Amino acid sequence: MAKLFAAECRAFIQAVVEKAAAMRVPVSVALVGPEGHLIALERMDEAGWITPETAWAKAHTMSAFRSMSPRFQDGLVTQQWLRERNPQLAVNAAVFTGGKIFISGGAAPVFKGEEMVGAYGISGGTSDQDEVMGRHAREKLGWQHQPATDDTPQEVKDHINAIYERVGLGERKL
């Protein structure tokens, strides 16, 4: 069973902080295990007062939703999927979980091989800015946000690609 370790999380946080500093956008970063339990959390000095809780909730949300379905590739897809089908579900889920659900960009699952080992959430910038920071850190560390073997059904890929197109990320494809 693969695992996401605290030392790896610290390296991810450092990569996010470097990008956030370059963008002049102070953020908080949270990483959780596959069950949503906190592994690491850091708030940059000037990040907003609620950003640590928001980052943790984003990470928890990605672990929960990705565990349910490969349809939930990242926070942006999850947000758009719910907006199109049942916007009230996100609000209800946040209430039912004591605020542990927050659906937005800047969050994605983390895979080692075929296994989801956790998820991250970044909060403090816009969804797009948080997303840029997360992608930067993933690329820098070689982290994957999808399983090594892509077994996503084609209709799901088509739907996710359509969502990316609608939210202005048409260059991103599954």
Image (spheres, rainbow, N blue to C red):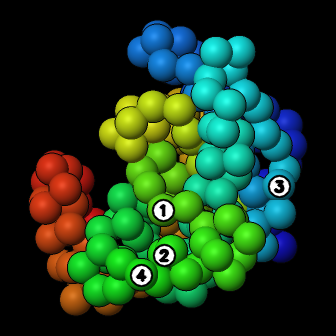
Instruction: Looking at the image, tell me whether mark 3 or mark 4 is earlier in sequence order.
Output: 3
Q: Is mark 3 on a helix, strand or loop?
A: strand
Q: Marks 4 and 1, how far apart in space?
A: 12 Å
Compared across the picture, whether 89 is left or right of 102 comes to: left
Quadrant showing the C terminus: bottom left
Going by the image, does 127 lie left or right of 44? left
Alpha carbon of mark 4 to alpha carbon of mark 2: how far? 5 Å
Is residue 99 found left or right of 18 in the rendered image? Answer: right
Q: Name the residue under label 2.
A: 90
Q: Which of marks 3 and 1 is in front?
A: 1
Compute the Cα span from label 3 to label 2. 21 Å
Disc on res. 38: 3
Q: Residue 81 carries which label?
A: none
Residue pointed to by mark 4: 88
Contact (CB < 8 A) between labels 4 and 2?
Answer: yes
Q: How crowded is mark 3: few (under 14 residues within 10 Å), some or many (20 or more)?
A: some
- Mark 4 vs 1, N-terminal side: 4
Percent from the top left, x then y, of residue 129?
Answer: 38, 33
Q: Which amino acid does label 2 sit on?
A: Ala
- Determine whether the residue tagged by mark 4 lies in a helix, strand or loop: helix
Three-letter code for the amino acid on which mark 4 is drawn: Gln
Residue 136 in percent (x, y) is at 46, 32
Q: Distance between the residues labelled 3 and 1?
A: 17 Å
Residue with the mark numbered 1: 103
- In the rendered structure, are the residues bearing label 3 and label 1 in contact, judged by CB atoms less than 8 Å apart? no
Which numbered disc flags the more N-terminal residue, 3 or 2? 3
Instruction: Report x, y in % for residue 116.
Output: 65, 69
For the residue marked with disc 3, what is the amino acid?
A: Leu
